[in-house]
Image (cartoon, helix red, strand yellow):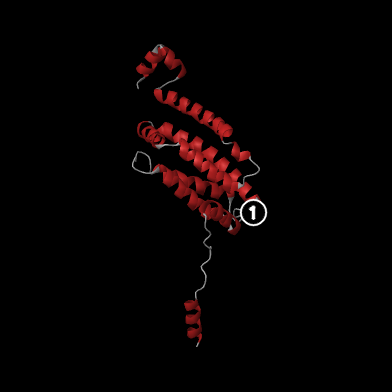
Amino acid sequence: MTIDDVCTRLRISKKTFYIYFRQKEELIDSVLQLYCDTNIKENSKQHSFWDDPALNAIDKIVFSSRHWKEEHENEYFVFFYDLLKYYPEVHKKMMVRMDEEALRQIKKWTQEGINEGLLRSDVDLDLLAHYINMQFRSGLADLIGKLDVDVTKTIDFLLDCCLRVLVNEKGYRYYQEKYKNKYPPLARKVGRSFKSSSILAKK
């Protein structure tokens, strides 16, 4: 869509357009800024479970991923692919805004999980937040423009990987028993054959 198309649709002159925007990229950036602000407010209303005292940090992140899978279909990734392709600078600015909000939310959620005794406390929150955000950004970025990829399965996989990095023994047990219906031990048990070989080695 050209600036002429925009002006025709709005029934304004190009002179009027240039009073507010120097170029089309500024219009797109303004629209995306409004989108981000509106999206944050809507998410706060729709995702009321984040403030539910009956849910712990693991419950909240699992529920959040379910909402995300429902809202973000393949068209969402195609949009960002087009934005990156045609307006790379606008895309870069939007990613910075989205990263800032994501990091804020991740650090808040992680601290809650640590306080609940479900997540590891021996990690740097800032580094951890960047790591989680990077994992999702990198993993989902590979989906952009690839309509044959199952977005839902990819989100599930990334969530499972990140949780396994973050949880302690208590959190791991809770996650496995409630959402995986099984509880494989974290540590490998020493087998009988291993004990026998150790005894023979000593002899």
> In the orientation shown, which residue stands out farthest toward the front?
181
Left/right of residue 157 with respect to residue 118 in the rendered view: left
Residue sitting at 42 percent across and 16 percent down? 18
> In the orientation shown, which residue stands out farthest toward the bottom?
203
Q: Quadrant of residue 152?
A: top left
Query: Residue 153's spot in the image, x, y percent?
Result: 42, 46
Q: Is residue 156 above or below residue 91?
A: below
Residue sitting at 60 percent across and 43 percent down? 108
Secondary structure found at label 1 = loop
Q: Amino acid at mark 1?
A: Gly
Residue placed most toward the observer, 12 or 54: 54
Q: Is residue 71 above or below residue 184?
A: above
Query: Residue 188's spot in the image, x, y percent?
Result: 51, 67
Query: Disc count in the image?
Result: 1
Query: How would you rate the neighbour count of disc 1 (Cα within 10 Å): few for under 14, some for 14-19, many for 20 or more?
Result: some
Is any atom of residue 76 visible in this view? yes
Q: Is residue 148 above or below residue 124?
A: above
Image quadrant occupied by the N terminus: top left
Residue sitting at 50 percent across and 35 percent down? 97
Left/right of residue 6 with respect to residue 58 in the rendered view: left
Residue holding disc 1: 117
Q: Quadrant of residue 45?
A: top right
Residue sitting at 63 percent across and 51 percent down? 114
Residue placed most toward the observer, 131 or 46: 46
Residue placed most toward the observer, 26 or 114: 114
Left/right of residue 184 with respect to residue 8 in the rendered view: right
Query: Residue 146's spot in the image, x, y percent?
Result: 34, 41
Is any atom of residue 138 visible in this view? no
